[in-house]
Image (cartoon, helix red, strand yellow):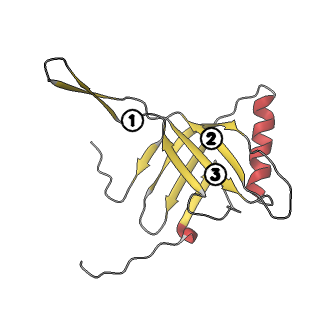
Amino acid sequence: MAGEIQSFSFKSIVCMLDNNEATGFFEGDDAIMIERNTDTATPMIGADGTSTVSISADDSAMITLKLQPGSPTNKYLENKHKRQRNGTLQPFAVTVRDTSNGEGGSAAQCVIVKRPSRSFGQNATVREWKLFAGAWQDRTQEFLPA
């Protein structure tokens, strides 16, 4: 409908790590990012000008969570990271969903690939966690199963 005003609020975003809601996100427009590891399709143009598009089967993604230093989610992820570094790999589920429109996605098995760098100074600094999802499944309000 033309002229319709829409809104967005981060308060409608829910991020779950297993059954624990992530809280204490840092400021900015990229507090949660999900980025695919590969392009969906790779085009190739032959010497004779014919083209082929290879469709990737890679559903993996990198998930970035930007947290405040005092976020309780830091402690939760630190404990998981410590166990992982000690040789106990326990993949965990991650779900991100916008409750206002149903957009988001999930992965049943994720692992920590990078813990945050830390800096200390006058102001609070971001704690950026990088997670790997072997099979991220997007869910959108227009999502139509095949």
Q: Amino acid at mark 3?
A: Leu
Residue 92 occupies quadrant: top right
Residue 62 located left or right of residue 38: right
Q: CA distance from mark 3 to mark 1?
A: 22 Å
Question: Which of labels 3 and 1 is toward the front?
Answer: 1
Instruction: Tell me where residue 95 appears, x and y as whole percent.
Output: 55, 51
Q: Which residue is mark 1?
A: 39
Marks 3 and 1 in Cβ contact (< 8 Å): no
- Of callouts 3 and 1, which one flags the residue occurring earlier in the amino acid sequence? 1
Rendered position, 5 above or below 62: below
SS class of the residue under badge 1? loop
Taking the spot 55% from the left edge, 64% from the top edge, the residue there is 13
Residue 29 located left or right of residue 103: right
Marks 3 and 2 in Cβ contact (< 8 Å): yes
Decide: few, some or many residues near mark 3? Use Cα within 10 Å; few <14, some 14-19, many ≥20: many
Taking the spot 66% from the left edge, 54% from the top edge, the residue there is 66
- Of callouts 1 and 2, which one flags the residue occurring earlier in the amino acid sequence? 1
Q: Which mark is residue 95?
A: none
Q: CA distance from mark 3 to mark 2?
A: 8 Å
Q: Which residue is mark 3?
A: 65
- Of callouts 3 and 2, which one flags the residue occurring earlier in the amino acid sequence? 3
